[in-house]
Image (cartoon, rainbow, N blue to C red):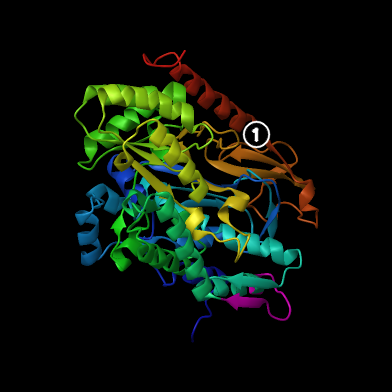
C-alpha cells in the first residue's frame, strides 16, 4: 500500500526540488565557519520574524526542519568541496548525524514579531547548516497569512514556487483552487536586467561582484533561475554550494555573525578564521559594536601578522562611512593589501554611490568587492512576500549552554539568547512570554508547543503581546554586560 506523502514532506520536496537535501544545500560560509569553529559543540539557533505583523503557521514546522537534514556528500561532492576549500573534517562528518531537539510554534497557530517560530538544538554544524533552508520558510508562512486574509491570486517565478502555493492552500483547507501564474521567463529577464545594471555601476568589472541571495530565495529552483541569469550577466560567484556545483560557478563564503558570537569575542574569532584555514580570512566586524569593538579587533589581528592577506566585510550601510574612514586610515599605513567587502542591502544606486565615495578616497577599485542578495533574487514584481518584508532571521542563541546575542551596529537587529521557546497563558493565547527550556512556567502559563494543556480558542492575532521571562531577561543582561566589558579591554578602542 502506497503511503500518501505528508504536507510537510511535499513542502520540503518543493523547496529542494528533490526528495533529500545534499550537504551542499547551504551557504559556503557555513562550512568555513565549522572548519574554524566547533562543529560537534551543542548549539541552538532560532527562526524569527523581526518586522511588525502577525503570521499564521499551517504546518508541523518541527517535522519540516527534520526533513531538511542533509545526506553525506558523495565522491564528486567531496571533490568539489575540497577543491574550493570547504571540505568536511571528520568532526564535521560526525556532526551531520547529530540528534535534533526542536521547538516550533504549533500547527494552526498565529505568531508575533520576535517570537521564536522555531528553535533547533543540535551539533553546531547541523543547526547552523539549516539556515538558508529554514529562512525559505518565510514564503509559505507569509502565503498562509495572505490566504487567511482572502488572497487567491499568486504570480510565481517557477513551478516549484507554484507548488508551494498549492501546498499551503491545501494545508489551510481552502475551497476551489488558487489562481497561479507561473512565468520563469519573465523572472529570468528581470534578474538579468538587474545584473546588467549592476555591471554598469561596477564599470563592467563583474568579477568584483558575488551573489549571496540563497537566504532570500523561496526555493532552490527559483535560485537556480536567478544564478543562470547571473552567469549570463557576468557574475560567476555564488554562496550557494549546491548550485555552484551544478552550474559550474565559483563558491564563496566569508563569515557570519555566529562565528564571532560562538567565540564571544571578535578578536578570538578573527584569529580562529585566520589560523585554521589556508584560505584568505574574512573579518565581519559589526556583531557587537563595529567602531569600538570590531574594527579595533581587526587592527590588532592585522598587526599580529601584517603580511597576511585578508578581507573586511561591511554589513551596515547606514553606518558605513565612519567605519570606512577608520579602517582606511589604518590599512593605508599597516595593510594596503586588505580587501573590502560591501554588503547589507546593496542595489544599483547604493553601488554607484559607494563607487563614487571610494573614488574620492582614491581607494583601489580592485580591492572593493560587493555581495548582492535579495536585490538580485527577490522580485516584488512577482511577489511582495519577500524575506525582507518580515526580516526573517536564523540566529545563534546558545552555545555550550551559554546564551549568545547579536547586537550589531543597526537598531532592531538584536537577537535573543538562550534555548528559546514560548509560554502561553492557558486561558488567553494572546499573552505570551519568550522563555527558556527548563524554566518553570508562571502560574496560569504553559508551553506553547504542548497542545491539550491549554484551550486555544479563536483569538485576534493583532492582540498578541510578547514579554521576556525572568530567566530570558537575566540572560539578556548577562550578554549585555559581557559586551559592555569589551569596551574596557581593547587597547585600540575609540574614545
- Magenta segment includes 128: no
Indicate the quadrant where residue 313 lies: top left
- Looking at the image, how many numbered discs can be counted on the residues? 1
Q: Is residue 325 in sight in this rendering?
A: yes
Q: Nearer the viewer, residue 48 or 188?
A: 188
Relative height, residue 323 to residue 130 (above, below): above
Position of residue 188 measured from the top left corner of the image (x, y, whole percent)? 47, 69
- In this picture, which residue range is highlighted in magenta? 170-182
Indicate the quadrant where residue 229 lies: bottom left
* Residue to which mark 1 is pinned: 469
Which residue is located at x 29 percent, y 50 percent? 92
Position of residue 299 measured from the top left corner of the image (x, y, whole percent)? 32, 23
- Element type at mark 1: loop
Position of residue 449 measured from the top left corner of the image (x, y, whole percent)? 63, 52
Q: Nearer the viewer, residue 305 or 446?
A: 305
Q: Is residue 57 left or right of residue 150?
A: left
Which residue is most to the bottom? 1
Position of residue 51 measured from the top left corner of the image (x, y, whole percent)? 65, 46
Few, some or many C-alpha atoms within 10 Å of disc 1 (few <14, some 14-19, many ≥20)?
Answer: many
Relative height, residue 70 to residue 175 (above, below): above
Q: Is residue 271 left or right of residue 10?
A: left
Q: Nearer the viewer, residue 188 or 164?
A: 188
Q: Is residue 80 left or right of residue 178?
A: left
Q: Is residue 148 left or right of residue 31?
A: right
Amino acid at each position: 500500500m502506497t503511503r500518501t506523502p505528508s504536507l510537510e514532506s511535499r513542502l520540503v520536496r518543493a523547496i529542494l526540488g528533490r526528495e533529500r537535501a545534499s550537504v551542499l544545500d547551504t551557504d559556503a560560509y557555513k562550512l568555513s565557519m565549522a572548519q574554524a569553529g566547533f562543529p560537534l559543540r551543542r548549539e541552538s539557533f532560532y527562526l524569527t520574524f523581526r518586522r511588525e505583523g502577525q503570521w499564521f503557521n499551517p504546518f508541523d514546522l518541527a517535522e519540516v526542519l527534520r526533513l531538511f537534514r542533509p545526506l553525506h556528500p558523495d565522491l564528486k561532492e567531496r571533490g568539489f568541496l575540497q577543491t574550493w576549500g570547504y571540505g568536511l573534517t571528520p568532526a564535521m562528518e560526525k556532526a551531520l548525524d547529530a540528534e535534533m531537539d526542536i521547538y516550533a510554534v504549533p500547527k494552526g497557530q498565529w505568531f508575533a514579531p520576535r517570537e521564536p517560530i522555531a528553535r533547533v538544538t543540535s551539533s553546531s554544524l547541523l543547526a547552523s547548516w539549516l539556515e538558508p533552508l529554514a529562512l525559505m520558510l518565510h514564503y509559505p508562512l507569509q502565503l498562509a497569512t495572505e490566504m487567511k486574509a482572502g488572497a487567491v491570486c499568486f504570480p510565481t517565478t517557477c513551478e516549484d514556487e507554484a507548488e508551494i502555493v498549492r501546498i499551503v492552500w491545501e494545508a489551510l483547507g481552502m475551497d476551489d483552487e488558487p489562481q497561479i501564474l507561473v512565468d520563469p521567463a519573465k523572472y529570468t529577464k528581470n534578474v538579468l536586467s538587474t545584473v546588467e545594471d549592476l555591471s554598469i555601476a561596477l564599470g563592467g568589472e563583474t568579477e568584483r561582484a558575488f551573489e549571496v541571495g540563497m537566504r532570500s530565495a523561496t526555493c532552490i529552483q527559483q535560485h537556480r533561475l536567478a544564478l543562470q541569469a547571473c552567469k549570463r550577466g557576468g557574475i560567476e560567484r555564488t554562496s550557494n554550494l549546491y548550485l555552484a556545483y551544478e552550474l559550474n560557478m565559483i563558491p564563496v563564503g566569508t563569515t557570519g555573525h555566529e562565528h564571532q558570537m560562538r567565540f564571544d569575542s571578535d578578536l578570538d574569532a578573527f584569529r580562529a578564521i585566520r589560523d585554521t584555514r589556508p584560505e584568505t580570512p574574512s573579518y565581519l566586524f559589526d556583531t557587537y559594536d563595529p567602531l569600538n569593538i570590531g574594527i579595533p579587533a581587526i587592527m590588532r589581528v592585522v598587526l599580529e601578522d601584517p603580511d597576511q592577506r585578508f578581507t573586511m566585510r561591511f554589513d551596515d550601510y547606514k553606518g558605513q562611512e565612519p567605519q570606512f574612514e577608520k579602517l582606511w586610515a589604518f590599512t593605508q599605513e599597516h595593510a594596503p593589501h586588505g580587501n573590502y567587502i560591501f554588503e547589507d542591502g546593496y542595489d544599483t544606486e547604493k553601488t554607484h554611490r559607494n563607487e563614487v565615495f571610494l573614488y574620492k578616497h582614491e581607494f583601489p577599485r580592485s580591492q572593493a568587492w560587493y555581495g548582492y542578495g535579495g536585490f538580485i533574487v527577490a522580485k516584488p514584481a512577482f511577489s511582495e512576500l519577500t524575506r525582507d518584508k518580515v526580516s526573517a532571521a536564523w540566529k545563534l542563541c546558545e552555545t555550550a549552554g551559554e546564551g549568545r546575542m547579536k547586537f550589531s551596529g543597526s537598531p532592531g537587529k538584536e537577537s535573543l539568547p538562550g534555548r528559546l521557546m514560548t509560554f502561553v497563558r492557558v486561558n488567553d493565547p494572546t499573552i505570551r512570554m519568550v522563555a527558556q527550556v527548563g524554566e518553570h512556567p508562571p502560574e496560569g502559563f504553559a508551553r506553547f508547543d504542548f497542545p491539550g494543556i491549554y484551550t486555544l480558542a479563536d483569538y485576534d492575532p493583532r492582540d498578541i503581546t510578547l514579554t521576556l521571562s525572568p530567566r530570558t531577561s537575566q540572560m539578556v543582561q548577562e550578554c549585555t554586560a559581557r559586551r559592555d566589558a569589551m569596551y574596557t579591554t581593547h587597547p585600540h578602542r575609540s574614545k
